[in-house]
């Protein structure tokens, strides 16, 4: 009976969202050839395929080119302040399990100014998906070195070349307590990008996707060799992970079967220097989620508030003389 | 429970009690001196329990119907070296026949567990000339000759200083009952104090049982034995005997400190999420809230930092009911960018700032009203927010309820300023009667009408109706960038000013609803003192004393600092002179370098001068101590030219 009932209800809910239902009236203002466009398309495709009601979908971002994404989605968007997308998203999720929360952030936003929140978001393992648009440079502020910039990169703040080795977002994330989902995608293989975003969406917990993303203005040609030579991309496949479609499999022959529960191998893959690993490096759905751990056992009602307040007042109560002796509380 | 009389210790106690009763009829017995009020301080090394002793004494007095105000004496370190001046830890308890609203002036009686912690009180001028001092005499014969010498030195200083010294064998007496007197002295002292202040023995035992309710019965029994022993010893050996008559308690009251009141205010306001990061002196509010909030299905989230705490609260507010973040000055500074985001995007948010001494790390455990300017003017650009200050323990409770309502009605940030003087001070107040109207309404999930805009500012009030995630048709991208009514990023000058105007209008709309508190004292006179926040009780007590001496002095206390209620100028102009009383810095006008051209005024004085064009002077100190009525009175007399 309940099945037919819920089917009836399902009929009443719109289930025919198309791609355009997730497109806002604002046309994306990223540069031509910017990898962010592919990420936006993957997001919208996911929403359509999952038939996510736009009013139940929230895209949270910080500041930077990547953080403009919520403006281009027809959903609830929160374009906040630099580096703080994650705590905002956590605040949204803590009392609203019904909302699908996506965080779109860049390498400066996530790995530099927001680095503390990145570490703790992994540890909280709340149900949400993070898309790290990593173009290895600050774009919106016009080319400064970012923490993920390759050593030697000449930028406006490193005119003689970036001094330090690049921070590796994958090894960092894999090293954090409670890590539950880490993947890497590239903007130039949209089908795989979509598959990975979809896997991340279905993961229970905090899913972290680093997306290598081309910046045609400030990191021109950075990934050209990889785009041209498919063998430099190592696709990670597994029965529990990605399954490559035949047409992609024909092009990307450099494949490795990788069990997403194998953390040691995930770290080895994350450290690959000459090849880009693409796929799901780590996926452990058994890690507890902070939003579930902290979900109240009972809803807050006026009666409950009154009861608890009175209990607390009783503990520190002073009563009129007649009841003084018995009134010292529990 | 084992009764006193069946244990060997109990028998010993009975014996001592009989002895004490016998002595009562002897030459030492004398009637208790009747007092209107008394200030007692109990100080020990950290960990010896003087704070528990003071709090228990206050609770017993409050339950007897006395007005009380307690203040913690807190060392800045967790384990300061023993027997050190900096390590003094304890409580001041002011007890009176009537309601007490502040910490008072100097102490009438000090109980010190060693002479070094006593010095901390003497050196800071906290002890009244001629006051009684009770000290543990175990140090006189300490095997370490240096300790014995140090004790002797202070003993001489006390005698020369004209204090009444009572050397009590606290340690020796406690050793008869417990193996480690360091862990029992406080209850022995509590017993002594109950005898000294003629407090009911049964009530005292009840209080000890309540204090140790979570402990083993053996521990409760041992503490009650110590309590009774202290009482018996004092009755037998001390000639200090006071009675502070109390009117019978006629209405139910609750007694708690300011931070507990803030925490219960959060529960009563219907807010469901508190995000915080540990910081003194605000944290105990979150401790208390953490213990009760989950019982009502709500969450205290300890974030990774102050910024995360604020943005977490903003996220929770955005997707649901107004949330709260609790902090102190340095945390407020860190949150300012996020507060600006809430202002710009019009997300309701309550920020509780329990102020401490600044700038920087400053005086973490001590009081200062130093954050008014950063609360009102903090964040970059024009960021109008509401700022209110709590002036009593009771006001801490109700301020949170009001703040939540304002925040949600106007979609604004509301900052509540409390401070270290209220955070640990305990005071009884009428038990609040729960009212369902305190709570926030359920989160709106209704369908947004076609064509409705997320920032559809009402021209009359500047207020918009926010769309909450989950509301069909309400999809928009909220942004901290300048935006138009559709929440679209807009750099257009007119659109930017439209947003600025409407966000500012909300403050004006709220301002029209504010009512000024009545003047304390006559409506006109020679001098008006203006205060805000925790100094209310001390200012009004000073005014009462001044008026009793015939001076034409009144006071006005401001609850809302931003916006300010109308009529303040009218009140100010009815007095010859106006001066703010603030617990924060102002340049001393008599400093050779200070002139009217460069003098920096206290915060409220600066704001009053700017808004009302009245020549408002200021007086205050930033010594990390609560302002005292006597000091305020002296400042007022100086201002009147009668010093």
Image (spheres, rainbow, N blue to C red):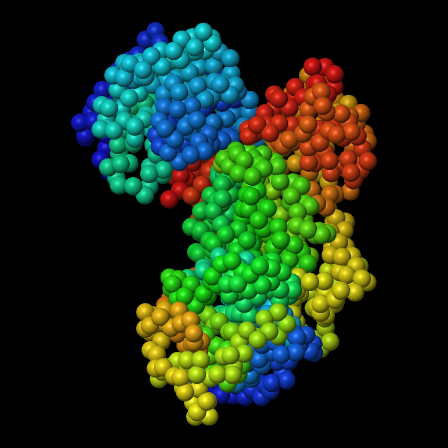
Q: Is residue B322 positioned above or below B209 on the image?
A: below
Image position, residue B257 (x, y; %): 50, 38
Viewer-proximal residue, B530 or B405? B530
Tell me if residue A77 can be seen: no
Question: Which residue is pictured at 56% across the width and 39% down the height?
Answer: B360
Q: Is residue B459 positioned above or below A226 on the image?
A: above
Viewer-proximal residue, B581 or B20? B581
Image position, residue A261 (x, y; %): 33, 74
Viewer-proximal residue, B126 or A167? A167
Image position, residue A274 (x, y; %): 43, 74
Viewer-proximal residue, A29 or B570? A29
Image position, residue A123 (x, y; %): 41, 62
Question: Left or right: A219 with respect to B175?
Answer: right
Q: Is residue A187 positioned above or below A81 on the image?
A: below
Question: Which residue is pictured at 61% across the width and 24% down the height?
Answer: B629
Question: Left or right: B105 with respect to B110?
Answer: right
Question: Left or right: B208 with respect to B337?
Answer: left
Question: Which residue is pictured at 57% across the width and 36% down the height?
Answer: B358
């Amino acid at each position: 009976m309940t099945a037919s009932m819920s089917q009836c209800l399902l009929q009443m809910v719109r289930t025919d969202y198309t791609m355009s239902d997730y497109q806002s009236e604002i046309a994306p203002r990223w540069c031509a050839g910017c990898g962010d466009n592919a990420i936006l398309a993957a997001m919208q495709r996911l929403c359509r395929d999952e038939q996510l009601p736009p009013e139940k979908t929230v895209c949270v971002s910080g500041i930077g080119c990547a953080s403009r994404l919520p403006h281009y989605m027809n959903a609830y968007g929160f374009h906040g302040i630099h580096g703080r997308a994650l705590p905002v998203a956590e605040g949204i999720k803590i009392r609203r399990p019904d909302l699908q929360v996506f965080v779109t952030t860049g390498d400066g936003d996530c790995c530099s100014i927001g680095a503390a929140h990145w570490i703790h978001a992994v540890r909280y393992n709340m149900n949400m998906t993070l898309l790290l648009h990593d173009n290895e440079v600050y774009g919106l502020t016009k080319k400064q070195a970012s923490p993920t910039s390759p050593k030697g990169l000449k930028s406006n703040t490193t005119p003689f070349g970036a001094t330090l080795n690049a921070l590796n977002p994958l090894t960092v994330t894999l090293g954090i307590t409670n890590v539950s989902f880490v993947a890497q995608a590239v903007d130039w293989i949209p089908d795989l990008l979509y598959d990975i975003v979809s896997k991340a969406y279905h993961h229970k917990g905090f899913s972290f996707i680093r997306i290598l993303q081309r910046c045609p203005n400030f990191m021109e040609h950075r990934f050209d060799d990889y785009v041209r030579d498919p063998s430099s991309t190592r696709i990670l496949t597994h029965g529990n992970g990605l399954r490559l479609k035949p047409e992609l499999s024909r092009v990307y022959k450099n494949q490795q079967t990788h069990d997403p529960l194998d953390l040691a191998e995930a770290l080895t893959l994350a450290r690959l220097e000459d090849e880009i690993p693409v796929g799901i490096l780590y996926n452990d759905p058994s890690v507890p989620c902070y939003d579930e751990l902290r979900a109240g056992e009972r809803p807050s009602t006026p009666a409950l508030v009154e009861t608890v307040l009175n209990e607390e007042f009783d503990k520190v109560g002073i009563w009129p003389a007649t009841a003084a002796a018995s009134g010292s509380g529990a | 429970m084992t009764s006193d009389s069946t244990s060997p210790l109990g028998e010993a106690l009975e014996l001592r009690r009989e002895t004490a009763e016998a002595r009562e009829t002897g030459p030492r017995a004398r009637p208790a001196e009747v007092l209107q009020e008394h200030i007692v301080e109990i100080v020990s090394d950290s960990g010896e329990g003087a704070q528990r002793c003071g709090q228990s004494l206050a609770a017993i007095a409050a339950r007897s119907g006395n007005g009380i105000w307690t203040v913690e004496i807190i060392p800045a370190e967790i384990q300061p070296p023993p027997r050190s001046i900096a390590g003094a830890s304890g409580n001041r308890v002011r007890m009176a026949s009537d309601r007490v609203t502040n910490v008072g002036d100097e102490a009438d009686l000090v109980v010190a567990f060693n002479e070094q912690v006593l010095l901390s009180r003497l050196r800071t001028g906290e002890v009244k000339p001629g006051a009684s001092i009770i000290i543990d005499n175990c140090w006189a014969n300490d095997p370490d000759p240096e300790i014995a010498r140090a004790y002797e030195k202070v003993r001489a200083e006390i005698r020369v200083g004209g204090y009444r010294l009572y050397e009590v064998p606290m340690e020796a007496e406690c050793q008869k009952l417990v193996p480690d007197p360091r862990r029992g002295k406080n209850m022995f002292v509590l017993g002594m104090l109950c005898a000294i202040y003629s407090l009911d023995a049964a009530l005292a035992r009840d209080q000890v049982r309540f204090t140790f309710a979570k402990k083993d019965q053996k521990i409760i029994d041992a503490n009650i034995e110590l309590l009774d022993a202290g009482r018996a010893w004092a009755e037998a050996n001390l000639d200090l005997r006071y009675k502070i008559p109390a009117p019978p308690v006629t209405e139910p009251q609750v007694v708690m400190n300011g931070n507990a009141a803030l925490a219960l205010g959060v529960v009563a306001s219907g807010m469901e999420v508190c995000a915080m990061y540990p910081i003194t002196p605000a944290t105990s509010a979150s401790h208390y809230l953490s213990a009760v909030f989950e019982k009502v299905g709500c969450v205290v989230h300890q974030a990774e930092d102050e910024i995360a705490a604020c943005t977490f609260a903003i996220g929770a507010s955005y997707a649901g009911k107004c949330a709260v973040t609790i902090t102190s000055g340095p945390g407020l500074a860190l949150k300012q960018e996020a507060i600006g985001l809430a202002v710009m995007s019009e997300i309701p948010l309550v920020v509780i700032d329990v102020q401490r001494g600044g700038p920087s790390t400053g005086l973490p455990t001590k009081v200062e009203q130093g954050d008014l300017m950063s609360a009102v003017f903090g964040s970059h650009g024009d960021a109008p927010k509401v700022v209110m200050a709590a002036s009593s323990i009771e006001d801490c409770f109700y301020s949170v309820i009001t703040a939540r309502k304002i925040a949600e009605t106007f979609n604004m940030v509301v900052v509540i300023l409390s401070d270290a003087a209220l955070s640990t001070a305990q005071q009884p107040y009428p038990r609040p009667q729960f009212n369902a109207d305190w709570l926030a309404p359920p989160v709106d999930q209704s369908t947004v009408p076609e064509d409705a805009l997320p920032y559809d500012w009402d021209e009359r009030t500047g207020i918009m109706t926010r769309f909450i995630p989950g509301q069909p048709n309400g999809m928009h991208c909220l942004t901290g960038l300048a935006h138009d009514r559709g929440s679209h990023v807009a750099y257009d000058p007119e659109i930017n000013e439209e947003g600025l105007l409407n966000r500012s209008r909300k403050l004006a709309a709220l301002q029209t609803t504010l009512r000024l508190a009545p003047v304390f004292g006559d409506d006109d006179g020679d001098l008006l003192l203006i205060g805000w926040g925790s100094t209310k009780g001390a200012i009004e007590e000073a005014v009462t004393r001044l008026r009793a001496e015939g001076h034409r002095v009144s006071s006005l206390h401001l609850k809302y600092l931003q916006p300010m209620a109308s009529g303040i100028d009218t009140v100010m102009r009815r007095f010859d002179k106006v001066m703010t009383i603030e617990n924060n810095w102002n340049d001393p006008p008599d400093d050779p370098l200070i002139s009217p051209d460069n003098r920096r005024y206290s915060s409220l004085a600066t704001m009053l001068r700017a808004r009302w064009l009245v020549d408002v002077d200021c007086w205050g100190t930033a010594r990390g101590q609560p302002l005292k009525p006597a000091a305020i009175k002296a400042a007022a007399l100086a201002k009147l030219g009668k010093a």
